[in-house]
Each structure stands twice: as structure tokens, then as C-alpha cells.
Image (cartoon, rainbow, N blue to C red):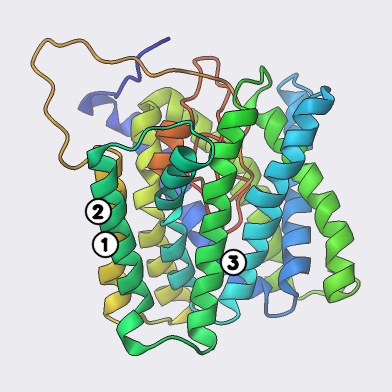
Amino acid sequence: MTPDITPDRSALRSWLPGFLALAAIWGSSFLFIKIGIRELHPLHLTLYRVAAGALTLLVVLPLLRDRLPREPRVWAHLFVAAALGVAAPFTLFGYGEQRVESMLAGIWNATTPLVVLPMAVLVFRTERLTQRSAVGLGLGFAGVLVVLGVWEGVGGAHFTGQLMCLGAAVCYGIAIPYQKRFIAGSSHSGVSLSAAQLLLATAQLAVVGPLVAGAPPMPTGLSAEVLASVLALGALGTGLAFVINLRNIRVAGASTASTVTYLIPIFAVLIGALALDERLTWHQPVGALIVLAGVAVTQGLIGRRSRPAGAPMVAAEEKPGPAGPTGAPPGPAAVEKAAAPAVDGRATPAADGGGRGVPATGPAVG
């Protein structure tokens, strides 16, 4: 049991560059998905992306003198986590971005923590529902309705695309508490568990992909732009981002590092506007702000009672566990409640959506 230490202002320069870099990497994953689906079926894009991420972590493992898990029980639970936290949400974001803007997909990714809490309370019973978190959930789901623009009516490809992106966030919301319940007690490192999870997701997609979408095209037949996007989603969003995220946690503390979730939608919107000339309807960014406010309330970032001067900090429970291979990890709710990283650098469960092999200690990204 060790306290989650937040660095003082003098240490800002030591973690802020990595913090912003991580938000940019995970925020850009939605752009890369948008480019990738120009030539690839969403299932094929997810297959190549996950395979690239798995290869990246398999290279990292021996460099860290680490290895894959060996216990059948761990692999069985990782199989479920790979389907719920990697294969399904990555594919749903791909299908969704065939119908909606990449920046809107980035906004929907931010709703993950709102799903994590009720699942943890009602299904996995790993958390308790407090008055504060109930208010935050209500506020967050009001924001969801605003983003959807329900007063404009339902139906149409755009509305369906938004529901697919929301479905991806729901998958993350189920996968995160599942990992906490069944995998977080494992003694394996976050890199080891993430690599195994990505390998299993690759195998799942290699079976399902050809049955649904036919044989995937050869990488040599892809344009340079699409191939670069696939590599960025897998190698950059999973491999490099994982390393950066763990460093941010060590240097800045888990609480500070987890707030990268709030920047991911901002980067997704900025990158979508600048690179793809996308535009949002007024109610979508307004709804996003309401969603983020709801997440902040559930996490105690808004409305938290000030700690009396001299009062001791409450130590956070630390359990090593797996990481979810997404590009953008789950939100602060997922991070803070799913598990805090141990001092030895082992990560606990998290989720990502957009394309990242997301460490258990980070937000989820599509």
C-alpha cells in the first residue's frame, strides 16, 4: 500500500511532455481509423492493427526480460478480455467511422467511464454506488443524449454510426471491471498481459474476419497512407504509448496520469478538423463537455471536499494486473477504480478504443 503521489509544480516539465504526447497519440487514433477504412474492411483493419501491436509488445517483452503468462486460467480470462476489450470495440469504432466523423468517435470514447461504474456496481460488484457517483452518472448520460441529438429524431446512417461508437465504449465498460474482477490479481506485468491479450485478439479476428468479410488483402496491396495508419495504430498507439503511459504514472502519479482521458477528445476533434476538415454540430461538443463533467463528478474531481491541512493522504490499493490493448486507455473512472499501478511498474486493467493497445493503467481509446 503506497500513496498516489501527485508531483509539485516544479516537476511539471518532467511529465507534461509525455502526458501531452500520449493524449496526441491516442487522440489521433480515430484519424488513423478513418484513413484505414478507406481501403480496409473494419474487421481487416482491426486484425492488422492488433497484429502490429502484438508484434510490438513481443519485441518489448525480451528487452524487459519479461515473458508471457503460463497459467491456463489467466489465458482463459484474457480470451474474454481480448474479445470484449480489443476485438469488438476496435471493430465497432471502424464500422462507426464509416458513418460518422472521426472527431465524433473520439467524443464517444470518452463515455467509457460512465459504463464502467454501473457495470462494476451491478454486475461485477467491485464498486459501491455513492450519491456523488449517481449524480455524475445522471449528468453524463444527459450529455450522451445531447451528443446524440435525440430531439432531432432517431434513425439514419449517422445515428447508427454513433450507436456503434457508443457500443464500443460499452464493450470497454464491461471489459474493464471484468479485468479487475478476474485478472487484476495476477502477478504478471502489464506488458506481459497486454501482449497475451493482443495475441488472443489477433487469433479471434483471424478466424472471424475471413468468415464475415472474406480474406484480408495483402499488406503490399495497400496504399502507403493506409499502411502507415495501420502501423501507427498498432506499433505507435500500442507499443510506444504503453511505455509513455507507464512512465507518466511513475513520474506524475496514477491520478494525474489518468486525466489524459479528458484531453483525448480534444485532440481527436482538433486533428479531425485540421486533417480531415470535419465539422461538428453545436450540440455534439456541448454534449461532450456535459459527459466529461459527469465523469469528473464520478471521480471526485468536481465537488470533492477539500482535505484539511496536515491530513494524511489516503493510500490507494495497488494490484498488478493486465492492460487493455487499446490506443486510448479507459477514462479516469476506469483507471482509478479498476486499479492503480504498482510501484514496480506493473499495470492494472484499463481499456482503449480507437486503436490502441491500451495499458491497464490508461484510458480506453477507440
Residue under numbered circle 3: 93
Q: Residue at x 21, y 10 (%)?
A: 312
- Which image quarter holds the N terminus? top left
Residue under numbered circle 1: 289
Residue type at the position of mark 2? Ala
Q: Are marks 2 and 1 in contact (CB under 8 Å)?
A: yes
Q: Residue at x 56, y 70 (%)?
A: 164
The image quadrant that residue 160 belongs to is bottom right
Q: Position of residue 5 (x, y in %)?
A: 32, 19
Q: Label 3, label 2: how many angstroms apart (C-alpha)?
A: 23 Å
Image-based side of 23 in relation to 346, left or right: left
SS under mark 1: helix
| 173 up-or-down from 43: above or below | above
**Mark drawn on residue 152:** none
| 29 up-or-down from 272: above or below | above
Image-based side of 317 in relation to 350, left or right: left
Q: Residues within 10 Å of mark 2 (few under 14, many from 20)?
A: many
Q: Are marks 3 and 1 in contact (CB under 8 Å)?
A: no
Of mark 3 and mark 2, the one earlier in the sequence is 3
Image-based side of 351 in relation to 154, left or right: right
Q: Residue at x 28, y 36 (%)?
A: 130
Residue type at the position of mark 3? Phe
Q: Label 2, label 1: how many angstroms apart (C-alpha)?
A: 6 Å
Residue under numbered circle 2: 293
Q: Residues within 10 Å of mark 3 (few under 14, many from 20)?
A: many
Of mark 3 and mark 1, the one earlier in the sequence is 3
Q: Position of residue 127 (x, y in %)?
A: 42, 32
